[in-house]
Amino acid sequence: MHFSIPSRSADQTTLPGSPSFKAKSRASSHRTGYAPSFFARLRSLILHPAPPLQSSTTPEKKRQSTRRTTVSVLVIAVFAVVAIFFTIMYVLFANIATLDPTGPRVVLVLGLDNTKYKDDYLAKIVENRKEYADAHGYGLYVRYVSDFKNLVHDVTKQGWQKLPLMRSAMQANPGSTYFWYLDQNAIIMNPNLDIESHITDVKRLNSLVLRDVPVVPPDSTIRTYRHVPADRMKFIIAQDHEGFQTGSFILKNEEYSWYVLDAWFDKLYQEYKFQKDEKGALEHLAQWHPTVLSKMAIIPQRIFNAYPNGVGESMYQDGDFVASLSGCDTPERSCLREFERLWDNRGRVVN
Amino acid sequence: MKDKDDYLFSPASRTSRMLNRLRRLPTRLRQVLLRRRILFVLLLVVLCYSIFANSGVPFFPRFPWGSSKFVIILAVNQGGGVMQWKGPKEWAVERTSIANKKAYADRHGYHLAIQDMSIKKRYAHEWRESWEKVDVIRQTMKQYPKAEWFWWLDLHTYIMEPSISLEKQVFNRLDNNTYRSLIDYNPLNLPVEIPFVDSTHQINLIVPQDCGGFNLGSFLIRRSEWTDFLLDIWWDPVFYEQRHMQWEHKEQDALEHMYSNQAWIRSGTAFIPQRLINSFPDGACAEQRGDKRIFYNQDEHDFVVNMAGCEWGRDCYGEMEHFKKLSAALQRKSWWRPFSK
């Protein structure tokens, strides 16, 4: 056994002193290299631990390697700075960068007619809506209906003006989901009820929806769908004994609502002289176009459109949400008198 | 004979010998690749072309991806021979048109739905007479549930440049190829602006305008919720009752009416310059002769020619034969076109 310093190149597979060094001459035609047995290598490693390799770098190579390391350090530093910069920008401005608009989840829509009604009456109506909207964090969209008189075919038929009004409200509040149109001649009598738990919440709506009822009472052939689930309903409206009551309805701010409002407001429907004006047009739409009817939910009238002088199921009772004075501008009735009676009896917000 | 000492773990069986050979396989492959570099690059290019080049590069083996997202709806058998006799010329025209669309659809992997448009006179004024286009589109959408775009073609049309795919002609640069505003070209004098239009809405209907209004002889419609609403509201008894005497072109006029009155329709409709998918022969729109926006231009290799109105006063058979020969001659003259684009 003799010791020897291993040669410069470190890629020798065997140490010269190991016994299997002698086996180099043995025939091993299928191999180009030479591999000693496992135990022999182990033994030689234990007995002759390899001394540290001498560094063979010249000063020239040293300078090159330091330059290379400097460059790589610089590159890493640049990347790190850029990454930190973008992270900071993202954290600070991510909210601004997103395009989804935000807004109150529910918006009340009110159209005021200042040609027939006095300003103090209108002010009281607005106050009533504002109190309700403030209590629940809802939005309130108020316009004069005369703003839309150029779009309407027959200005004397007031009912049509609510359609461009709703469309305008939806366009002005792209971040809001539910839009509740409530006629000017109606009072929110119980402002402690909120729209979502009272009407639009899916489970609640499912329990309210009237299924398999004739679209035009008492006995039209077309009836509401039986199996459409409530989460697909986008148009919530009530019926009285005559037909659809368009004084109070809820629409979701989606493609469906824009389609329904625009189709409903079409010039040919306005010119057709339906007996019930826009109510008749809606009944026509619901009966002839299943894409409209399939997403309509008809709910009991007392939920959000009760009549104080109604009969039977539509009659307003204490604690009901809304009292509607619709039809009060006929000669037999007086809007102001009925309004005063209800106004003093209305409920206030309980904090 | 191999020595047991020669291996760290001596190979006891044939499997480990084979594993050894496998281990050396990558090196063998690498050597072959390096030696035959050019060959491998060429093979790779051919493979990529076969898989990815959807528009027919001729003579390359093509692997179609699967169900196409384009369906061509070809309306044949207009009238079904009820109002007019279908003679040999009418049959010839129909054969030519169908063969042309079939070849085009096969070349690009599109579906072709040949729909029968014979007159169904069930109840006059109640059945949607002449609104059958709407019902046919709805039916075809049900038949091809995975397709996205549907291209309606009337019978008297001819695809002059079959090497151009729909993606290349229309969809790759959809926003550049279509226009949404009537400011520049408004042959019907429709109101240019109406309130509540959303100009960022997705385009669901692409319609060309000709000298007299919208032209539904060749148009594109996309499967969407908006389209469901359109196909439902397109025919309405109140509209029909008031206007069917004035609406000569039936569903075309109904669409023009809805476009001028209903904002949601404007939001989803875009116009395409007529010569992109609906060029006219010289006989149609005769009053506007010379208008560069309307007529088929063979020097610019217009895509489709629509011989609209040829059954009233012109010769459908003659025109169809003329365009068939012209198309064949153009393909022969510029055989290099599919490779250049």
Image (tube, coloured by chain):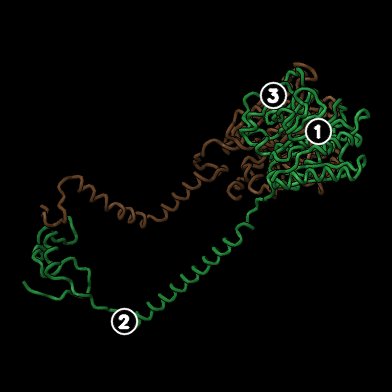
Chain colours: A green, B brown
Position of A303 with respect to A46 (left or right) is right
Q: Tag 3, which chain?
A: A
Rendered image: mark on residue A324: 1
Position of B273 with respect to A38 (left or right) is right
Instruction: Find the distance from the CA under tag 2 to the CA under tag 1.
Output: 98 Å
In depth, the one of A203 and B60 nearer the eye is A203
The image quadrant that residue B112 belongs to is top right
**x%, y% of residue B340?**
60, 50
Taking the spot 18% from the left edge, 71% from the top edge, the residue there is A50
Q: Which residue is mark 2?
A: A58
The image quadrant that residue B38 belongs to is bottom left
Crowd tier of the residue under label 1, counting other residues whose Cα lies within 10 Å: few below 14, some 14–19, many 20 or above: many
Q: Nearer the viewer, mark 2 or mark 3?
A: 3
Q: Which residue is mark 3?
A: A224
Residue A88 vertical position relative to residue A326 in the rendered view, above or below: below
Instruction: Find the distance from the CA under tag 3 to the CA under tag 1.
Output: 25 Å
**Mark 1 element type:** strand
Q: Are marks 2 and 3 in contact (CB under 8 Å)?
A: no
Label 1 amino acid?
Ser
Taking the spot 13% from the left edge, 67% from the top edge, the residue there is A46
**x%, y% of residue A68?**
41, 75
**Mark 3 element type:** loop
Q: Nearer the viewer, mark 3 or mark 1?
A: 1
Q: Earlier in the sequence, mark 3 or mark 1?
A: 3
Label 3 amino acid?
Thr
Task: Mark 2 vs mark 1: tell me if same chain.
Answer: yes
**Mark 2 element type:** loop
